[in-house]
Image: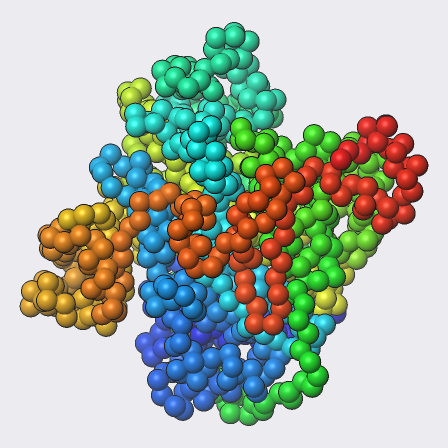
Amino acid sequence: MRTAPLEGLRAVQLSDAFAGATVGQLLADYGAEVVEVEPPGGSRLRREAAWPFWGRGKKSLVLDLHAEADRAVAHGLARECDVVIESWRPGVAERLGLGYGVLARENPRLVYASITGFGREGPLAGLPGYEAIVMAKLGAFGAQAHLTRRPGPSFIAAPFCSWSAAQLAIHGILAGLIERDESGLGQRVDTTLVQGILAHDPWNWLLRKIALQYSGAFEAARPVTARGVPNSPLAFRLLVALTKDGRWLQFSQTTDRLFHAFLRVTGRDFLRTDPEWAKKPTSSEERDREAYWQELLTAVREKTYAEWRAIFDAEPDVWAELFRRGTELLDHPQLHHDRQVVEIQDPERGPVVQPGPLVHLSATPAPVPRPAARLDADGAALRERAARAKPRAVASGTAPQRPPLRGLTVLELGTFFAGPYGATLLADLGARVIKIEPLDGDPIRKLVPFPEVAGVKVLMGKESMAVDVSKPEGREIVLALARRSHAVLRSFRAGVAERLGVDAEALLAANPDLVYLDAPGYGIDGPCGRKPAFAPTIAAGSGLSTRIAGPSVPEGPALSMPQVKDGATRLFAAGAFIAQSDGFAALGVATALLLGLVAKKRGGPGQRLLTTMLSSVAHALSEDMVRYAGRPAAPRSDPDLLGFEALYRLYPAAEGWLVLVITNAREWQALVGHAAFQKLAADSRFRDGAARRENDAALASALAEIFATRPAAAWESELVPLGVACVVSAPGPVEAAVADEDGLARKLGLVVEVAHPVLEKHPRLVPALRFSRSPCVAGEGPALGQHTDSVLREIGYDEARIARLREMGVIGG
């Protein structure tokens, strides 16, 4: 039996982009041999702070893919590998003779993963797939305009598109390997940075659709008013507040029980019991909501952070995370308890502290991570091996056309978004997902005022069973289903599954072949295992919120109440953005489930897996999450949230705003080839990359002066054809891309209409992966308990027994 899930597999990484490097890093973490093909001089990522993390466990091979002899080496390695990863612009792989069509002729078992910005076809296929370009086109920067006091969009510094697209590509690779085990054939897998960020939004797109559909009854509102007062009562339950000694806290009190506990410990029970105060959070009057908000802010500020920590220790239902910054997540007690922080001895940098592997597997664990290889360290041996490689035999017969996960069953035990949406992604790939809901439904169904809207995305493609698992008869139903399932997903807080008798020990006893994934916010035990974790909580505790809004938010005990309100608004918006830690975690859940299923297919036993929201965000923020002597700075936005540097930032134009991204000399030459910018080429301050970096502020000023002379749309129309990544920053919101008839996602063919038992017809995103041979499934969301009876019949329950269970209050639907 193999000791690591991917041991014995070979991958060739042709990408030196963040997304491609992330894919290769995960494969290497779990035992695959990953050959990173680097250009002469090395990957551009070697200059980045996180290179020891991105490059760990891989082999290095330097090839000039513009030279025929070196292309032959890459071709030779592809003949005998299992996976190829590329993230070039559409057509580049084909021009180099390394496209899927060419490689698959000599290696029909090849799973070929391609990541582009906007797709290989369509109106935006030619645009460079840089993170900021995708974010701008989707209106992500415009949607966060309220993060700064200045007018215009706000630059978002977190890699929402790239890391998410990398996870989607990993899903495609692992699903492709599972399908290959049945068919004997590989295939091409495509995803995009657009689909990466659209995977995040839990429900805003459908709220917007409802508001557009019922324009007289509902209105789509921004999270805050023009004065910065929250529009949603959820902002009070997920309160951002400042302590007496000036530390920002993110509270985590979404349910009634949790919020009532918070009001009790703050001495503010009257906010719940007094009829007038109780109405203020949902009042249409801004002054009512502001008065309620100020009362909560005042309550938090009555205590120091140390006093709040004592409350958290004594009151399990009251919890807030400190807003961390930079590498501080590496010190989080829960990460250390879960052994999710490792120290690797790097040959060039010495000891490097960094996140451990994303998923813990109890029976087939990841091997101890190896350091990143020196440049071309494996070149000679790999060239020799490539020269000996022979084409694989072409399979005979008709290639099967079936969803890649057809025949696999996942039993889902969990609520809200992060865990359940991970299972939804598997349903899109053809897995059967049976969701066990409490009799009154997953609470996410009721999380926003319009019924069912909040739950649609996590329910799509699933079968819903309403079961009271706290009763012995309900627990027996879960055990019976576990015996017929391949994987179980549990995303409860620590202790809940054990109390219900559906924990890993119980279900693995019922079915020793199960892949049982624990996917909590923090962990299954330890210092924070029993703490409530929601997207803003993890965003604060991980440093994601301060990565986005930190430069614009002050901290300290001297802040006035208006400053506190302003900072709280910005930090809340940063943590509850359309792309957030729930989305990162959901993508990590799907990766974990697929990794466990691949391990099982490759001869592994049933086992227990663990991944958490916190560890997923640690990986997503890998640019920050490395610590070693002499570490260069990670990219940081400026305090005005315009961008990283002069050649990667937002600029106001005569009309509208635009984003410019230039990453190499070729793109710079294309820019200064335009008449309006030719004077920059003659300026000695900007003569080369080093000079431009040294004179960054002057370059930004010069560019701003030029861009201010014409509308943003005009600059895009003239510069993009020259090969310059310069596009209009759309005003947003991002959900318009899905909900609106002329939205970008619709133009790219990423939206389909589906039915719903309550909402009737509504838009949903198409599956985030496209396989060259295997169709995916754009499923519909079920009503609560819609499949209770049919599934019970399937596992042997007769009509009389089902009726008795309903009378006893064990089942619903």
At x 79%, y 57%, the residue is 513
Q: What is the x, y in percent for residue 25? A: 50, 64
Q: Relative to the observer, which residue lies in front, 332 or 574?
A: 574
At x 67%, y 85%, the residue is 395
At x 65%, y 65%, the residue is 404
Q: What is the x, y in percent for residue 724? A: 24, 65
Left or right: 235 as drawn, with respect to 547: right
User: Looking at the picture, does residue 741 appear above or below residue 566?
Assistant: below
Q: What is the x, y in percent for residue 145? A: 30, 39
Q: Quadrant of residue 427?
A: bottom right
At x 40%, y 91%, the residue is 69
Q: Relative to the observer, which residue lies in front, 391 or 117?
A: 117
Q: Is residue 354 visible?
A: no
User: Looking at the picture, does residue 372 appear above or below residue 499?
Assistant: below
Q: Quadrant of residue 232?
A: top left
Q: Which quadrant holds the C terminus?
A: top right
Q: Quadrant of residue 242?
A: top left
Q: Is residue 215 visible?
A: yes
